[in-house]
Amino acid sequence: MEFDLENPLTSLKEHQGDTIPALFATESDHMPSLLSFKSSDSLSSIRTEAISLFSQFSHNVDPFISYLALNYMDRFISKRNLSQGKPWITRLMVMCCISLAAKVRNTEMSLSALQKDSGFIFDAQSIHRMEILILTSLNWRMRSITPFSFLYFFLSLFDLRDPSICESLKDRASEILFKSHHEIKTLEYKPSIIAASALVCASRELFPEQSLSFEAGICSCGYVVKGNLLKCLAVLQDRVINRYELAVDALTTSINTQSNKFVQVFSVKQQSKC
């Protein structure tokens, strides 16, 4: 059966009484060791290199597979010492994390196609060994509890009678989660806090007049520490949303500049023909 990141234990849409407490009780088991990242500059460098490889390997791959694979990688490298200066090890690890995530999601994936443009070709035995190393290092906890696991729960705190409002908030929050996953600062926060913060960000964008009430409702939840929520919210707003908007603005400016140049050149050429 395909693993759903939004429903890691059972169907959260049913909001079963024993499911929600279990999610909050075990979410920390699916987080990387923050102490490892804070105490090792080399680990941050390995992560940066690995994320670059993820972009290369996971092109045209289901974004949920990429998200799950990066969760595996963060947890793995925070527990194992990877050798720097051996790029093939990082490549093998990234490829195996994607492969494992695809298997958990019950998605067919060709490893030969994945390696085609990588510059390294690994044999089946090497891949198998790395996959087993990752599995054992993560204690075989592959049904990761991620921020996606908490979206339905937090939305259920509100009487959103219009289903389209609920879907809009969830869809925008999901976009924010995908954009934020590469940001190393998010590793400081529990998945539930990241999910709550993403929903607050979404509410501010989509329904600004009601966003204060929405934020207050989430902060009143007994599972949420308001201070952590506000800190995580600042990270998402500053390092994810604002950076993305700046990048879009820069791209739009570039396109407009090129367009204006084209119009000017076209106009000159037309005049020269007259």
Image (cartoon, grey):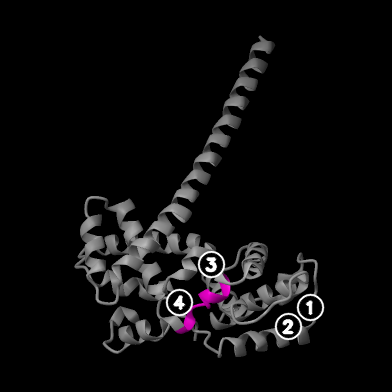
The residue at the point 66 percent across, 68 percent down is 42
Q: Please say if the residues under marks 3 and 4 sit with CB atoms less than 8 Å apart.
A: no
Q: Name the residue at 63% across, 67% down.
A: 41
Query: Is the residue under label 3 in contact with that under label 2 (CB below 8 Å)?
Result: no
In the image, which disc is placed on residue 127? 2
Main SS type for the magenta part?
helix
State the extent of the magenta-drawn residues as a range. 29-37
Which of the two residues, 64 or 135, is positioned nearer the viewer here?
135
Residue 98 sits in quarter: bottom right
Q: Amino acid at mark 3?
A: Pro
Task: Find residue 63 and name its label.
Answer: 3
For mark 2, give the secondary structure.
Answer: helix
Q: Quadrant of the C terminus?
A: top right
Question: Which residue is denoted by mark 4 in the rendering?
Answer: 5
Q: Earlier in the sequence, mark 3 or mark 1?
A: 3
Helix, strand or loop for disc 3: helix
- Mark 2 and mark 4 lie on one chain; the one further toward the N terminus is 4
Kind of residue at disc 4: Leu
Crowd around label 2: few <14 · some 14–19 · many ≥20 (10 Å): some
Query: Is residue 58 part of the magenta span, yes or no?
Result: no
Q: Magenta stretch containing residue 33, yes or no? A: yes
Q: Which residue is mark 1?
A: 122
Mark 3 or mark 4, earlier in chain: 4
How many marks the image carries: the answer is 4
Residue 126 vs residue 132: left or right? right
